[in-house]
Amino acid sequence: MVPLLFAHHRFDIVAPAALYWPAKNALLVADLHLEKASFYARQGQMLPPYDSQATLAELADLVGETGATTVFCLGDNYHDGEGEARLEPEAAKQLSAMTAALEWIWITGNHDRDVAGLWGGTVVDEWTGEGLALRHEATAGSELPEISGHYHPKVRIAVRGRHVARRCFVRGRHHLILPAFGSLTGGMAASDPAIEACVGGPAEAIIGLKDQPVRFPLPFADRAIEKIDDPQFALPLVTTGQ
């Protein structure tokens, strides 16, 4: 596990796109985009139809690894409004077993505003508690420090002489954006202006590498955050490898 601190809370990066929250014994993931392959199949673009099973199997493994008793899914849980009802039978069986055994919170997203908890779990537009807001899309004017998804942030890094894209977390004074967890999800550059508009600066992209975080300063313009004067939000920016 790789520690990640945000808003007086300790989290652990337990996978390229998942956080464990020890204080709540909870896993946080975003953008599962279940049934993305079947959505594209309906449009005539054939993809391997096992994305939902693969995503849920990975999530089940993390539940077993961490012992989490709660799962927060931060929106775009299904790729489209009909994905919940269309969920492949084996994946539906997997999901029903997990939601029956765990406290499972579905936060709605722009792709699945009408998610109903057909396979179990509780549906909310956002969750607040412990001084945090969990929602799908970051809001520049949030009064609470927030954790969100939506943007699928990635960062390009040099590995053995070539550049590869890696999923990353984006952390600012007031925002923590999770990468997409789903097996068929794409990504947006962590430095994209759309992310900057929400997060402001200083900010950094973070990936978990072995037992330590690797952090990349993001070139975002500084933005005053009203009602927040805690020095913890003035994050030290470090260079790669430190």
Image: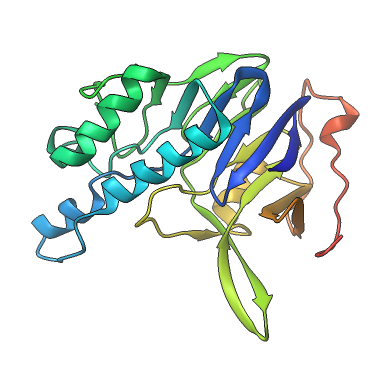
| In the depicted structure, whether residue 230 falls above or below residue 138 | above
Most foreground residue, 223 or 136: 136
Most foreground residue, 8 or 87: 87
Quarter of the figure that contains the N terminus: top right
Residue at 24% across, 21% down: 116
x and y, in percent, of residue 96 in the image: 26, 26
x and y, in percent, of residue 43 in the image: 11, 59
| In the depicted structure, whether residue 242 falls above or below residue 172 | below
x and y, in percent, of residue 86 in the image: 13, 39
Residue 125 shows in the view: yes
Residue 138 shows in the view: no
Most foreground residue, 175 or 164: 164
When asked about the image quadrant of residue 233, the answer is top right
Q: Is residue 10 left or right of residue 84?
A: right
| In the depicted structure, whether residue 234 falls above or below residue 115 | below
Residue at 59% across, 42% down: 177
| In the depicted structure, whether residue 215 falls above or below residue 160 | above
Quarter of the figure that contains the C terminus: bottom right
Q: Residue furthest top?
A: 129
When asked about the image quadrant of residue 238, the answer is bottom right
x and y, in percent, of residue 50 in the image: 23, 54
Residue at 49% across, 21% down: 70
Q: How many marks?
A: 0
Q: How is the image coloured?
A: rainbow
